[in-house]
Amino acid sequence: MPIAGTDGTLVGRLQEHSGKVQAKTGLLTYDNALSGFVIGGDGQILAFSIISNDFVGKPGGMRLIDRIVSVLAESKNPPPTSPAR
């Protein structure tokens, strides 16, 4: 899969998270998609699939998707806790 900011269809995208995002793009007129893996701010590997359908401004859908992936890359989730008994 292409690596953000490094190669393939992600060479010019998500450069601030280079090496932390591997994903495949999808594009139709007014429809954009990005699916793959991101290493979150806490080191966890997260799987994601984001689809933007009928977004009238072509670059707007990609910008929105990239922002969502950036939030995931910067996220820090607390460790899971055991359920109360």
Image (cartoon, helix red, strand yellow):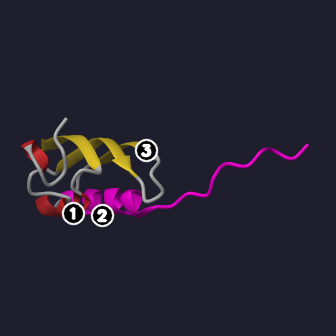
Q: Which residue is found at the position 20% from the left and 59% from the top?
A: 14
Residue 79 in the magenta stretch? The answer is yes
Q: Which residue is found at the position 8% from the left and 42% from the top?
A: 8
Q: Is residue 73 above or below residue 33?
A: below
| Contact between labelled residues 3 and 1, with CB atoms less than 8 Å apart | no
Q: Is residue 47 left or right of residue 79?
A: left
* Amino acid tagged 2: Arg
* Amino acid tagged 3: Leu
Q: Is residue 82 left or right of residue 3?
A: right
Q: CA distance from mark 3 to mark 2?
A: 15 Å
Disc with the residue nearer the chain's start (3 vs 2): 3
Q: Which residues are magenta?
A: 62-85
How many neighbours does mark 3 have within 10 angstroms: few (below 14), some (14-19), or many (20 or more)? few
Which residue, as the protein is rendered here, is positioned at the far top? 1
Q: Which residue is mark 1?
A: 63
How many neighbours does mark 2 have within 10 angstroms: few (below 14), some (14-19), or many (20 or more)? few
Q: Is residue 57 visible?
A: no
Q: CA distance from mark 2 to mark 1?
A: 6 Å
Q: Which residue is found at the position 45% from the left and 51% from the top?
A: 43
Q: Is residue 59 left or right of residue 67?
A: left
How many neighbours does mark 1 have within 10 angstroms: few (below 14), some (14-19), or many (20 or more)? few
Label 1 secondary element: helix
Which residue, as the protein is rendered here, is positioned at the far right? 85
Nearest the viewer among 61 and 53 is 61
Residue 33 in the magenta stretch? The answer is no
Q: Which residue is found at the position 9% from the left and 45% from the top?
A: 7
Label 2 secondary element: helix
Q: Which residue is mark 3?
A: 46
| Contact between labelled residues 1 and 2, with CB atoms less than 8 Å apart | yes
**Residue 85, image quadrant:** top right
Q: Which residue is mark 2?
A: 67
